Image: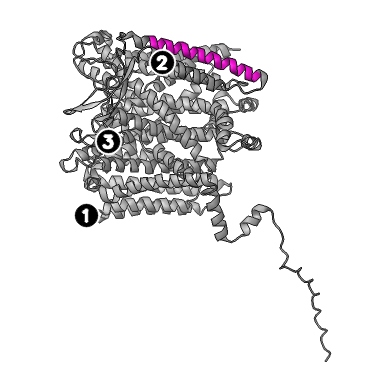
Amino acid sequence: MPLFYRRGFRRLLQQGLYVAATGLLFWYIYDALNLREFGFGFLSDPAAFKVANQWLIDIDGVTNSRITMYLVGVWASLRVVFVAILLSTVVGIVVGVSRLSSNWLVARMAMLYVEVFRNTPLLVQVVLVYAIFLVGAPIIQEVLNIGDFAFVSNRGVAIPWPVPDAGLWGLPDWGVGVWVALLIAIGAVAMTVRRQRQDRERATGQPQYGNRWAFGIFAVGALVTFIVLGLPVSIDRPYVEGTRYLEGMVIRPEFAALTIGLTLYTGAFNAEIVRGSIQALPRGQTEAANAVGLSAYQRMTLIILPQALRQMIPSITNQYLNVNKNSSLAYAVLYDDLFRVAGIIQNKAGHALEMFFVIIVTYMLISLVISAVMNLVNARVTRVGV
Amino acid sequence: MSELPPIPRPEQQPLPPAGGPRRIVLPPHRERARRPRSVRAREWVRRNLFPSWRGTLLTALAAGVLGLIAAGVIAFVFFGANWEVITHNRWLLFAGGFPREEAWRLWVSIAVVFGLIGLAYGTWSSLGRRDHLFVLLVGGFVIFLMAHGGAEIWSSVYFLIAVGCMYLGYLLTYQLPRATSSLRTLQVRVVGGLLILALPIVLLLLLVGGDVGIRSLDGFVLNLVLAPVGIVGGILIGIPLAVGRASSLKSISWTCTAYIEIVRGAPLLGWLFVALFILDDIIGGDLIIRAMVVMAVFTGAYMAEYIRGALQALPRGQYEAGQAVGLNQWQRTRLIIMPQALRISIPPMVGQAISIWKDTTLVTVILPLRELKGNADSAISQFEFTPDRIEAYVFVAVIFWIVAFMMSRISQRVERAQGVGER
């Protein structure tokens, strides 16, 4: 056989040509980019700009380095992503189950919700929520005071928030640390008791109420240690002074708009996933649940949803990854997430390529964490015989 | 003259049993269907809305919520809102900086696209009552918008001509026989070819000659151009990527995997950031062209994943059958594998197309380009319209919704016509 027609030679030739072409492309890009000034040193220079929407962090931004400001942005992104993932899951399950409701009106309303929010751009939803907040909410001088407990204005919603304090018996601040450590210990005890009771239930067939026991132990333990330690956490109530909120927890309109937009948008997609995975179950499951006399609620929570969960987790994970990436829309409402802070740094210091590198690595890391957590969940729910 | 024999009378029927005529008893569901409409309606309402006290409570609750929402929406749309921000800025929202004296290019493009939609519908599907209603509603909405506030009557006429083109195309192809024949094949090929040619034709119409250039694309027209370019470019990039990722040659499969994963790792906004600051050095060109390239590159990675999924879903026997009849690898991919894989991946690819359609709004966020949402921002930055943000964004949402909804309906039709999901 001539050399040219031999399989191995041809594969080698194809790969060689391909590698040469790709290499040429990369060389061209490398040459065009002009990387003489490539480097990340600029990230440790002082930032000289401020970011809003700090929470649990107090940074003035004047002397802090740019990388610190970027990390503040990452923290802001994580908050949005976390809250939006939780809320969109709840919305998705509720609406997805409602779409299959035997109640015509409920099913139709769920369908309307899905069709409206799935087919409009997320950006428009976010800016619309933001606009409604800015136009609809009262200005801070006419703040809506809900019993001196919460305040609503177009500067945001202020609600009470627990903060660690010095305690009744003059215990220093570490009282909170001790309490948290004790809580973890009590939680471990509660989980052990739960597992033991579940094992016994499986062995004897008698109900042992593992979940109730675990919850009871945790609640009593938490309350007792809380009182014994001298109430190390107190509720911080907000108040308005001039045109500012002081103390409490302030949910700013930017955060609210982004989170609500992400929740509504992703919730519509999650609802379709939930509906699809429930419909994919064989009808026999519903009939079997009816046959053993379960109520509609028991049927859903004990038979249908646990099984549908296995099917929906890969698609839902995909939606969570989308939430992570879509959180970059913070840029549109000037919420200082990682993307916007990176944009500001790029604006001040240049180095677009390096900033893009930092951005994509951050998003990939967050995605990796989400995937890893969801893989754990997946491994748990697909384990048969639990 | 003999008498005709008397016609034999049919035998006397046995009398019906006491208590009315005997009926044939049907199975229960047919029996139920026999009852008068009013009874069935009452039964339906009882079963679907008021099955038990709990169901009734749920219905009441849902009706209350729905009533509140509906009341709020009606109060806003008909009484609270100042829609002048839209009607006053029609042209800004629709085409922005597109030169007005070249408006005929837009109208001709719209007519061409509408006509093609009609041709495609007539070839592969049919228009139902709901489709006519949809056309009527959307058409009414558009004409109402254009007629409001003393615009020239001609725009409405042009729009009606475009809709007429759609129905003309539909009637033209709908009359042709559907049965498999050489004529049918010819028809499918012609319409398919026209669909493929549509984008270049429209781009030529919009961009070449006269007083227009790539920078004239503005407002809603920019969305309408960006999305198809992204989708078509994405499919063209995605097919070789998917094949490459499945390749047995390690260097090819690794680079394709790296491309797909890196592109999917960052949000589209991040890639538009690249278009703004980095691509300038690499490919240069106008910002709109760079944005188009980024859209295509971004969509390509997602399309590749869907096509790869379809490739994996194909039974191995298909590859082996191709080998058995003596096709080489190229022929196998082109004639056996790709047609089936593309057919399977239609639903997710349409989903991605809708997603890209919505994502064209992102162009405004960091690029100095103005599409529909960006021009809505310009509209509310005018002094007299500053309080009308909500109206402007609601309008943008409605427009995007109409097109996205249409795309999802068409995809359902295509799936049914192609028999996707059936075996």
Categorize mark 1 by other alpha carbons within 10 Å: few (<14), some (14-19), many (20+): few
* Residue interval drawn in magenta: A178-202
Q: Nearer the viewer, mark 2 or mark 3?
A: 3
Q: In the drawing, what numbered circle is on residue B10?
A: none
Q: Chain of mark 1?
A: B
Q: Is residue A200 magenta?
A: yes
What distance separates the C-alpha of mark 2 from that of mark 3? 50 Å
In the image, B86 versus B180, the foreground residue is B86
Q: How many marks?
A: 3
User: Is label 1 in contact with label 3 (beta carbons under 8 Å)?
Assistant: no
Residue B10 visible from this viewpoint: yes
Q: Earlier in the sequence, mark 2 or mark 3?
A: 2
Residue A223 in the image: above or below residue B215: above
SS at circle 2: helix
Q: Considering the numbered disc 3 on the image, is that residue within a helix, a strand or a loop?
A: helix
Question: Which residue matches tag 2?
Answer: A22
Q: Nearer the viewer, residue B248 or A298?
A: A298
Tag 2: amino acid? Thr
Residue at disc 1, secondary structure: loop
Q: Chain of mark 3?
A: A
Residue A133 circle label:
3
Query: To which residue does mark 1 refer?
Result: B150
Looking at the image, which residue is at 72% across and 61% down? B24
Q: How far separated are the C-alphas under marks 1 and 3? A: 34 Å
Taking the spot 21% from the left edge, 38% from the top edge, the residue there is: B378
Q: Position of residue B397 (x, y in %)?
A: 33, 40
Judging from the image, mark 2 belongs to the subunit labelled: A
Tell me what residue is drawn at x 38 percent, y 52 percent: B137
Q: Quadrant of residue A121?
A: top left
Amino acid bearing label 3? Phe
**What's the CA distance linking mark 2 and mark 1?**
58 Å
